[in-house]
Structures are given as C-alpha cells and as structure tokens.
Amino acid sequence: MSRIIKIFDTTLRDGEQSPGCSMNIDEKLMVARQLARMKVDIIEAGFPIASEGDFEAVKRIAQEVKGPVICGLARTTDKDIDRAAEAIKPAERGRIHTFLATSDIHLKFKLRKDRSQVLDMAVAAVKRARKYTDDVEFSAEDATRSDIDYLCKVVEAAISAGAATVNIPDTVGYAIPQEYAERIKNLFDRVPNIDKAVISVHCHNDLGLAVSNSLAAVLSGAGQVECTINGIGERAGNAAMEEIVMALRTREPYFEARTNIVTEEIMAASRLVRNVTGMTVQANKAIVGANAFAHESGIHQDGFLKEKSTYEIMTPESVGIKQSTLILGKHSGRHALKERYKELGYKFVSDSVMIQEGEKEPPEKDVSRVPFYVKESDFDKIFERFKKLADQKKDIFDEDLEALVAEEVFRIPQAYELKKLFVRSGTDTKPQADIVMAVYGAEEENSSSGDGPVDAALRTIAEVTKTKSRMFAYEVKAITGGTDAQGEVVVRLREDNFTVMGQGSDTDIIVASAKAYINALNKLEYLKKRGEKTVEKMCE
Ligand code: KIV
Ligand code: ZN
C-alpha cells in the first residue's frame, strides 16, 4: 500500500527568488490557480514581510485560490510571523512556515548567536505562529551542514512547541543522496516525538542532485517534498516538481509512495511558469523539455514503432502533452487552428463569459489574464498573426502557437505599440533604425543609430517612449529548427524598484527584440500606474 507524499510547491516563493523571475500579483494568481488545478497539497505563496507586493500576493491567493493549504514564509521574529498570519488569514486552510538556520557556520557568521539562543528562538517562533494556526511548519535552514546531535534537539523542540511539519532543507545544495537519506533516517531513529510531525525535504540543485536527494529522503520516510515548477529557484534552482511527481508515478512500486498531483496538468503548469517568468526550459529537460518525448535514433524509432514501451517509460499524454493529429500551414483555417489549441489544452470562451472550473468567477477585468482560457476576440488576433506567420514559414509547430498565445493573451494594457520598424545594417554602414509607434494612441516616429541593428532599434524605441529603464538581460533563441524559425527574445528591464521581463517572437529577430522590449516597457508602465513595487528580496 503506497504512502501519499505531500507536494509543497514553492514556485511563488523560492522560485520567484531566481534572478529576474519576479512575478506581479496577477501572474502569481494565475500560477496559484494552475497549482490548485494540479491539486498540489500546499502552495507557498510568498514571504509577506519582504514587501507590500509579496504581502498582497499571499493575501489575494489566500482569498481566491481554493483547495490547497496556502502558506506564508516568516523568519522567527514576531513581526515576520504576525505579518505572515495576517496574509494567510483569508485562506480556507492557512500555514505559517517559519525558518531559522541551525548550522554552526550560519550561527557564527550570520546570526551571531549560540546554539541555545537559536533553539529558544525556534521554539518561541513556533509557539507564536501556533496562536494563529494549527498548521505550522518549522525549517532548520542549512540542516544538511548542521551538527546532527544539535539538529535532533532542534527538531524535537520544534515538534514539542507545536510544529506539525518540520523541514530539513539542503539550503546550499551540498548533500549527496545516500548521505541525505541517512540524515533523515537518523532523525527518525533518534527524535523521540518525530511521529507527531510530517518530515519535509527541500533541496537546492547546486550539484544537480536536488531531485535525487528528495527521492532518497522519501525512501527514508520523508512525507512532504518541497519543489518548484521547472525547478526554478535560488541559484541553480530547487527540485523540479514534475520530476519528483513523475518519478513517484512511474516507479510507485519501488518507492511505495505516490502523490495526489493531476499529472496531466504538468505541461500546462510548465508552460505557464515559463511564460510568466521568461525563464526558458532547456530542450533536454526531463518531463517538460521539447525533446523529452522525441525519439531520434533509427534503432529507437524502430523499437518504438513496434512497441511503445521499448523506449517509453511514461506517455506524453500522462504529463498533458497531446500528440498532434493536424499539420498546420498556410492553408489551415480558423477551425483547424482552434482544434490544435484545444488539443494543447486551451479552452475558448466568449468575451463576456468566463467561469473557471470549481472556482469562483473571476472579475470581468481579469478574464484575459486567466491561463488557458482564450477569449474569442483574442483568438481573432491570434488567427491573424498565425496567417502572417504561415506566409513566412512553411510548418507551424506547437512552440510557434505557444509563442502567439504568450504575446496575445499574456498581455497587459498597451501604452506603447509598434507600428512600423525599418532597420539598415551591414558590413560598411552604421546601423540605423526608423520607427513608427503608437504612444498612448498618438502616432510618433523617430530614427536613431546604434552599435548594431538591435541596439539601434531599442535606442529608437527608448527615445520615442522617453523611457529610462536599464536592460540587464537580453536572450535570443530560435523557437524551432530551420532558418525560417521564429526567434524568441526575452529581455529584463529595471527602473527604480521595478523589475520586469518582456517577451517577443518573430521570424525577424530584430522585430522580435523590438517586441520584447516594448512588451517589457508596457509592463513597467502598468506596474508604475498600479504603484506595485518589486522590492529586492530581504536578507536575514
Ligand atoms: O533553502 C532554504 O533553506 C529555504 C528555507 C526558507 C526553507 O528556502
Ligand atoms: Zn530554498
């Protein structure tokens, strides 16, 4: 009989701590709704004390997302815990997650406290959190580098103080699977009240071992795994939820454990997180990479065609990938395009009706921001873009369709719009861009030169829009193969305390760059109008 392993998703907290991955409130809500659809057990929605935006996001998710437990992170200080409690208050079921480092290296250099002071702080924090909710989690930060005797004492004290879950994080991604499994087993053997709490694991991927470590801990009795969609997170990231869940599903008899996750929603969640964070997924990434189910070699293809199980340990359908039955190109009509989007998991709704399954009806203004529901008026625009694209390239792949949705559906109010762009560049000429844009509806034009054609185009846009943001990341990649492939550009901009990501795609990479830049400028404008700041994350 399999045990149920709880899935604690921290995409919106630890995942958001990845450089340049910050999400605004609407984006966080979209992700939280998808996590609820997947039936994750706990959503760690943010770190309420970190900023007004974080607080608001946790509170909105607690108000609007039903099903999972909604959790807020807090250090052990009273003000952190009180703030987290206030943010999760509207939730059907709310959890406070408080953490404190237990390794000597953190005690000496970061906290400047001795072991007994830290133990007291942990106990006091758990007790304070318990005044607000029965569901309190304590994390012994840097547990894998903590003295095991001391760790046992802290875990025992946290449970006695009322922690229902105790997390043993590999904060710096230092552990090795056998060693981590041994540490978890040690805790089970030595902490007398350990049966009163769920033991959780939270692994970072610095040595590429986050998933292996988490699974090794499950074999030692861990009952909760903390993870993120696509494995995003601090530095090299956290354990990838899709990998944990599919390993448990595919090898359930080995682990004698399973999760409650609706695995068919995995691909949709992966695409959504990729779209809102702009953090691309490598093609050979397990489960959700573009090549994860592609069989290339002749021997593999031959075996696969004779009997799928020769080379396939899980089906693409089990993670929500629907195999294409339609080849799309310039002769395809609206119906064929819509059918393919439906196969990819999108639903179509009239502009006025928008009801989410099992959830309360979102306000009308949010309609276009709910994932995987496409309004008919957006579909008209997508179809128009599809026709143009089909004239430029022969085969249209799913990735091209995803890019069209990313631009037309994940869209915020358009203060700036690109009307025309003309760029001259070459071996013996200084690159020059001429641009026509709509700025709050009024047509404006300008010309400027730059170091290269992309630089010229972006400088011209900055002049027309009179914006002063600083670009700190620019990434370009081909969405599919071939010289007629669409280029996808992701840019990250910063202005004052606002950090945003913009995306654009086109068969012309200079146009894609202009679109990505304008998309980011529109987001900055939107955030500035809403007064929502993405404050740098706090350090202890
Ligand atoms: O990595 C870590 O230790 C954390 C804690 C806050 C659980 O993210
Ligand atoms: Zn972490």
Image (cartoon, rainbow, N blue to C red):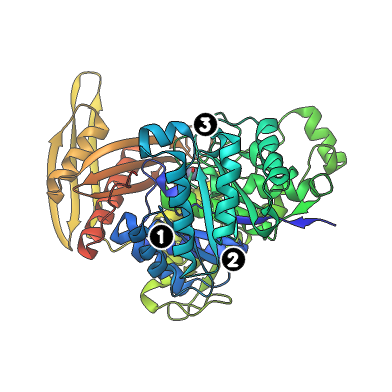
Q: Quadrant of residue 197?
A: bottom right
Closer to us: mark 2 or mark 3? 3
**Residue lying furthest right:** 306
Point out residue 386 in the picture as x, y percentages from the top left corner.
Answer: 46, 54
Circle 3 Cα neighbour tier, 10 Å, few/some/many (<14 / 14–19 / ≥20): some
Point out residue 206 in the picture as x, y percentages from the top left corner.
Answer: 52, 31
**Residue lying furthest front:** 116
Circle 2 Cα neighbour tier, 10 Å, few/some/many (<14 / 14–19 / ≥20): many
Tally the marks: 3
Going by the numbered disc 2, the residue's amino acid type is Arg
On screen, 473 above or below 249?
above
Quadrant location of the C terminus? top left
Q: Which residue in the structure is indicated by mark 2?
A: 37
Which of marks 2 and 1 precedes in the sequence?
1
Callout 2: SS: helix
Point out residue 128 in the picture as x, y percentages from the top left corner.
Answer: 44, 64
Q: Nearer the viewer, residue 204 or 66?
A: 204
Callout 3: SS: loop
Q: Which mark is residue 212?
A: none
Q: Which mark is residue 206?
A: 3
Circle 1 Cα neighbour tier, 10 Å, few/some/many (<14 / 14–19 / ≥20): many
On screen, 430 above or below 234?
above
Callout 1: SS: helix
| Label 3 close to label 1 by CB (< 8 Å) | no
Which of marks 1 and 3 precedes in the sequence?
1
Going by the numbered disc 3, the residue's amino acid type is Asp
Point out residue 515 in the picture as x, y percentages from the top left corner.
Answer: 31, 47
Q: Which residue in the structure is indicated by mark 1?
A: 27
Going by the numbered disc 1, the residue's amino acid type is Glu
Q: CA distance from mark 1 to mark 2?
A: 15 Å
